Image (cartoon, rainbow, N blue to C red):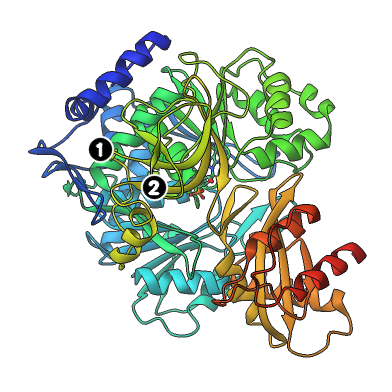
Amino acid sequence: MLRLHNFEEYQKAYQYSIDHPESFWIEQAESFRWSARWNKVVEWDFYSAHTRWFLQGKTNITINCLDRHAEIHPEKTALIWEPNDPSKDVRKYSYQELLDEVSRFANALKQLNVAKGDRVLIYMPMVPELTIAVLACARIGAVHSVVFAGFSATSLHDRLIDSAAKVVICADANDRGPKLIPVKAVVDEALSQGLEFVKQVIVYNNCDLSVTWNHERDYWWHELVKGQSTLCAAEEMDSEDLLFILYTSGSTGKPKGVVHTCGGYMVYAMYSFQLVFQPSEDDIHWCTADIGWITGHSYIIYGPLLSGVTTLMFEGVPTYPDPSRFWQVIEKHNVTIFYTAPTAIRALMAAGDHYTEQADLTSLRVIGSVGEPINSEAWQWYHEKIGKGKIPLVDTWWQTETGGILISPLAGVTDQKPCYASYPLPGIQPILVDSAGTEITENGVEGLLCIKYPWPSIIRTTYGDHERCRQTYFSSFPGLYFTGDGARRDPEGRYRIIGRVDDVINVSGHRLGTGELENAINEHPNVVESAVVGFPHNIKGQGIYAYVIPMQNVDDPNQFFKEINTQLVKSIGGIAHADKFMVVTGLPKTRSGKIMRRILRKVAEGDLLNLGDTSTLLNPEIVDEIISKYNRQ
Ligand code: WT7
């Protein structure tokens, strides 16, 4: 696998990867164990959203994550688990132990007739069994679809229908901060409308919470694995067999199932992990994301385990028992690579510097940021208070659809500039285009961020609806993959990601579609129509601002807002809680009936002087109403 030491080597490798992409990727793919070699490196056509990598290659990602490391150093720690409650026991698994547990659970799944190609939905708190379940699916060729345990029963229900999952794996409850959150009860509710294709529910006993039991359908994890063999032959997978589906929000309609496949995802997860974080054998890597998001898939499970380093999983939250928790965990486990989100950094920065001084952070070698643009103040604080002004800070830009990091400083290899995700990794060919799709070739400009050549872990399709994939990513600018982000390129060619240019908002690094939020609000019986926009929020990056037209007069707006928030949490989950509302009698619309979100965004930002031209609206008077309501709030 590619090893780089300085900027000149980076530039050389980058140039080579553009001039000879196939040879470049062959070299990266050669560091894995394949049971049959590919006969073609890449086949692609962005016009039809078609990409295939390492065609006809055969492998199993778990052989590369587990077996090959267990053979060399069976005793080496693969996984460290830090519980929510700091007084509870830490759990550790060596590579051999993790392989044994994955095999045992894989055999249990087989016993339940789960086979290659079946979808398994995993709805679990951050416990080691979540990682074991993911890898056990991969072991037998079942397609895992992890759903973040904060999602509501309705969201879970929709994802079950879309994936037609045969089995659900969950826990009784989630021990999170000061709360115990029921999990099995949410699964029961999601399944209450009879989804016959779900044959079994496997429940891991995490908190000894009493749960209702369906004797025909429900199985305890510990009973299923009892007596299972620790040997389970890995299913031979084609490079392009599905590895997982991960649902994410788009600008319109319901969430879509992003599909990643076995060969290309494997190559890119390890490649990007190694290049960005520059791990060595004794690193302890801690990514604070939840495995319910792509960051957890690629940089808690697959990237680190493929590389044979030790990965840390944390069950809790940054502020429990107090805001020194992250720093305490770093000291306790001698964490060397720490990877978190700007929203957490801002919250911990606001809590006060004294918390960072309560722990010894000298084990740290690299720190990283992901999920949303990091503002300059947070970048400086992170760099100085956590990185002590000297260790590399990598601001990594990527997406669920990209499978791995595409643009980022490479720790200790390329330089860093505050707020810049910086240069593309070798093999990645970003370009900026204007709204007509014309490439902007000069530097020091802003534009829409597209990628013009495929990389191994690019999205293959949206599950069950290939046309949606083509429409969403490949139709705005024919021949290019469109990211949905706007970006600026500095004179030296570094990229700064500005944010989404579509109707996706990013709340605390969680991606939400305005359409999806509006659909949820509209379910309230007293709502005619609504429009949701993002606005700058100190901690969350973006907050949710909802404009709502009620059916009947609202006497008590506070009560109405509460009900709407209840509806949002019920339809989507806690992450969809709105921050601000305005009751309006209409929404600004164009003559063709489209909501003019630009105006709503400006008002939500408090930028009332720059609303632009409103004269072409169907109902310009509504803008005056909104402005006067804003001024009275
Ligand atoms: C969107 C993708 C990639 C894992 C987490 C989010 C935004 C992501 C950065 C960054 C600025 C970023 C983009 C992107 N984003 N990383 N370093 N700087 N913005 O994955 O939920 O698929 O969201 O997150 O807007 O399009 P996701």
User: Left or right: 246 with respect to 512?
Assistant: left
Amino acid type, callout 1: Ile
Say whether disc 2 or disc 1 marks the residue closer to the N-terminus.
Answer: 1
Determine the secondary structure under disc 2.
loop
User: Left or right: 562 with respect to 388?
Assistant: right
In the figure, residue 367 lies in which quadrant? top right
Q: Which residue shows up at 39% across the image and 36% down it? A: 431
Report x, y in % for residue 9: 35, 11
Report x, y in % for residue 570: 64, 73
- Tell me the distance, in whole angstroms, between the alpha carbons under discs 2 and 1: 43 Å
Report x, y in % for residue 161: 40, 74
Q: Which residue is mark 2?
A: 437
Q: 374 or 412, which lies in front?
A: 374
Residue 557, label in figure: none
Q: Quadrant of the C terminus?
A: bottom right
Q: Quadrant of the N terminus?
A: top left
The answer to whether residue 27 is visible is no
User: Left or right: 358 with respect to 618?
Assistant: right
- Whether residue 592 is situated above or below residue 373 in the rendered picture: below
Q: 16 or 157, which lies in front?
A: 16
Amino acid type, callout 2: Gly
Q: Which residue shows up at 68% across the image and 42% down it? A: 343
In the figure, residue 89 lies in which quadrant? top right
Residue that lies at the very extreme toward the left in this rendered image: 39
- Whether residue 100 is situated above or below residue 186 in the rendered picture: above
Determine the secondary structure under disc 1.
helix
Ligand 1 neighbours mark 1 (CB distance < 8 Å): no
- Whether residue 548 is situated above or below residue 336 in the rendered picture: below
Q: Which residue is mark 1?
A: 63
- Whether residue 133 is situated above or below residue 532 in the rendered picture: above
The answer to whether residue 552 is visible is yes
